[in-house]
Amino acid sequence: MKKTTLAIVIAIAMASASAGAQDAERLFKVAMNTELVEGNLRAAIEQYRKVAESAPRPLAARALLRMAESYQKLGDVEAQRIYERLTRDYADQREAVAIARARLRPDSRMGSRRGDRAVWTGSEVDLFGTISPDGRVLTYTDWARTNNLMLRDLQTGTSQPLTNNTTFGEFGFTNFSVISRDGQQVVFNWQPRDTGREELRIMSLQRPGLSATWRLYENQGKDFVRPFDWSPDGKRIAVLVEREDRSSQIGFIDVPSGTLRVLKSIEWRGTERIVFSPDGRYIAYALASSEFPGQEHLFVMAIDGTRETVVDADPSRNQVMGWSPNGTLLFASDRSGSTALWAVSIEEGKPKARPRLVKADIGTSWSLGLTQAGALYVWKRASIPNVVIARIDLQSDNPLDVTAPVFHRFVESRGRPQWSSDGKQLLYVSCGSTGGGPCKIFVRSMESGAVREILHTLRYVGLPRFSPDGKSIATDGTDAKGRRGVHLIDVQTGQTSEILRFEPGSSRRVLGWSADGNGVLLQLNGGSQTIVVRRDVQSGNESEILRTGRVENEIRMSPDGRFAGLLATESGVNRSLVALPIGGGAPKELFRVGSGSEINWQWQWLPDGRGVVVIAGPTGSNAPPPELWLVSLEGQSRRLNIDMSSWEESGHFRLSPDGRHAAFVAAAGNPGAEVWALENFLSGVN
Amino acid sequence: MVLWLLLLVIAIPLGLDLYMPVPEGNPLSVEKVELGRRLFRDRRLSRDRSIACSSCHDPERAFSDGRPVAIGIARQVGRRNAPALINRGYGRAFFWDGRAATLEEQVLQPIQDPKEMDMTLGEVSERVGLPPHEISRALASYVRAILSGNSRFDRFVNGDRRALSPEQQEGLRVFRGKGNCTSCHVGPNFTDERVHNTGIAWRDGSFLDEGRSAVTGQLADRGAFKTPTLREIARTAPYMHDGSRLSLEDVVEYYDRGGNANPALDSELRPLKLTASEKRSLVAFLRALSGTVSGR
């Protein structure tokens, strides 16, 4: 009897513990929704606190981590205390502790840790090649002068061409290349100038020169075949076939027969990397989620096509980086808030355990391959772009207060901050470490400080802009099927709808919203003319606003609609800023630079329409930083004493509607890109 | 070894993916495919022993039946067109409304449908001497072995530039471009496996068939049906979920005018403004999607 009673008590206790765990899991999901979807950080912190108090240790650690991140987003030092608590009290929760430790480091940038080293920095660095198995040489493409396939010797610091162009594309064009696992050969895309048909060619690294190459595969029609990896035995090359209708297929090409075998058709999703397992029996790749193109999930497939396994479907951006010699799949993921290196053990094509963090904040998801010694070579931007909001006083001698930024947030690329017309919201964009997407849109509330991601369904976004009422965002972009157009995104729900689809080769561009908020302004270039039209969002009807001689740059309408501003070019250089009166009349030149200088395309109207802010400066690779100018409609200009040395050219400089804040992208570090070797991390993985 | 086994069971024709998502619980085997083939033609699966699966999915008609809608036992008229059962091993949703998630689930439903075969699983199990799960696995395995590929289109894409006539090549350009066909008919099987409202079910201000909405209860799914494959389409008339379009020319005309406008019309549909020549080319291309059908 006693035994029975005890069993019942234990069963009840277990059941209630299980129910409690389920409740905590539910509350954790609610808290994540509060943080990430609603953007209510304070409320989310309280919900995470309750989870941490009641949940089993693994979930409690995750809740504490998110709680710390929420504090961090608010700029609250409590974040540090929670990270310290995690490292002190949750040593058994290794993943959470690793992230907490990384966040506690005073400088968590790659390079500050043992085993990470930059091996090549400069304007030549690109991301189209791979590292040799011994880590000595790297293939890349010369985009500046010849479009040759190149070989960089990382030990001597010298480069040599592998193809024979003496001028750009003299004999043909190349882009992607992959060195074989034995380091003896390289496969590369080649488009001969005479035929124009894309090919895959193979060259011995011992015998450079086009004449010694042989054609493995010739693409059909306008299809494109991109090589990713050699099988360990050198008998196959993993490829992505991009079809003329923008759909893609994962497959491999047999060497030397050149037979293409399609393993899996992936519609329009594409993939950035395919890697063979060490035994050559499997390939791994990441595919965008069908629902949210900004999320990418990991898959492993048997190369005989008999099985595909979902390795990880975390709702984050994930990219395959390589496969360690012992069968551990390495991937980059932004699930912890910034791009980090993760690992998951794979056995017989299936994950053995949950993914675990290997290196925090690696700052890139672009792998150039793993060496036999286990070093991971990555491409990354040399600078770290951050969206910054700082106070500004245009009348002051030192207008911009960058010593105490209101907001400072790392973005991997782009940034492109834009204010809502009431100045209460700021949106910005992050398009992955290479800038090619998928793109995420974030909105920061200036009142609460909360930042939330808008879950839209576009793969790439160009320049999103708030509608006048702040409820919608209009942006040019690419949809999940790879088609360019103008889209409307609901700021609250992320619901995305197409306003206009661009025909292939279309020269249309979006200029922004019409003042009434019911239409968007489009610029159409055709022949010798440029037309600006207003397109009604609901009906699709278009009405002409302006017709002028052809303008290659973007026309920008003044906030009051009285002027169209444009950059006038001389010998291809933006030399002057001109205002065209919409109602007719002579154009006014507002600003001009002398020879050797250029006006940057990111000029903007002042919120009151009474002038413009112009970024201008000398051209050339070693030119000093540009300058910021305040220019009135009467053409009077005043240079603002603002240090623009860390300003990111593609990142914009936007004054808030009340003129008291400036949002821009600042980048710490050198311009250009770098190749890094990440070493000594496999012992932890193995 | 696994590849060898797979090849022994089914041969993947030119144009189709090597990877077919076969569930781990029902690996392909020669025995199961053969059993499934026999069951597919077995009239004992219907109450009055008058029809088999093959009655509506005739191997000689690319596994369709040539009728606007399916006819069940006792000449009962069904609601929807019997779809061509080809390349369904690559499917992700089954039936016109996508209500079945797996082939194993799908193959048992017509047997139990009162308007089709009208049997219980117990009854059919007793008649054929097999438990329901074995019937399901065998039929699903056989359906996975019904493959169509190696069409003129496939040969063209794989390097034989003369496999398509100039008119068919022009049709392919229309298919991928102005016709916007690939928005839904994508990939080697020419289907995105998703549901779309093309307006076919919309007549005189209401939906004659709720389509996917009857499964999900979602207003947005009203009148939406799964994109069918276009392979063997020249042999599978009449077309659409209700068999209401008798010819390929008729289908092309329907899409050219942007479908029937209705509250849930898919945003991909809009007037195409194809010329008469483009329409002819498109139909010529569609006829080039017939190849060899295995599993007969």
Image (spheres, rainbow, N blue to C red):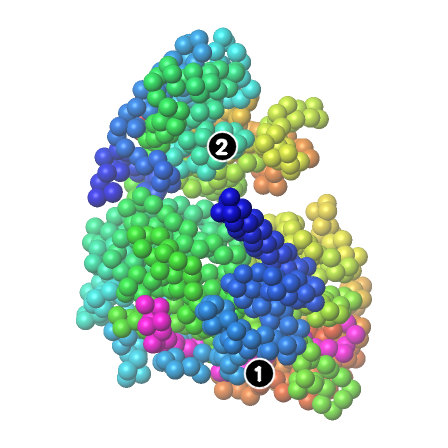
- Name the dominant secondary structure of the magenta segment: strand
State the mark number for residue A646: 1
Mark 2 lies on a secondary structure that is loop
Mark 1 lies on a secondary structure that is loop
Residue B155: give x, y in percent of width and height.
Answer: 31, 38
Q: Residue furthest bottom?
A: A397
Of residues A296 and A553, which is closer to you in this image?
A296
- Amino acid on which the number 2 mark rests in the picture: Ala
The answer to whether residue A339 is above or below residue B240 is below
Residue located 21% across and 50% down the image: A257
The answer to whether residue A548 is above or below residue B41 is below
State the mark number for residue A175: none
Residue located 47% across and 68% down the image: A93
Mark 1 — on which chain does it sit? Answer: A
Label 2 neighbour load within 10 Å: few <14, some 14-19, many 20+: some
Q: Which residues are magenta?
A: A657-686
Find disc 2 in the rendering and name its residue. Answer: B100
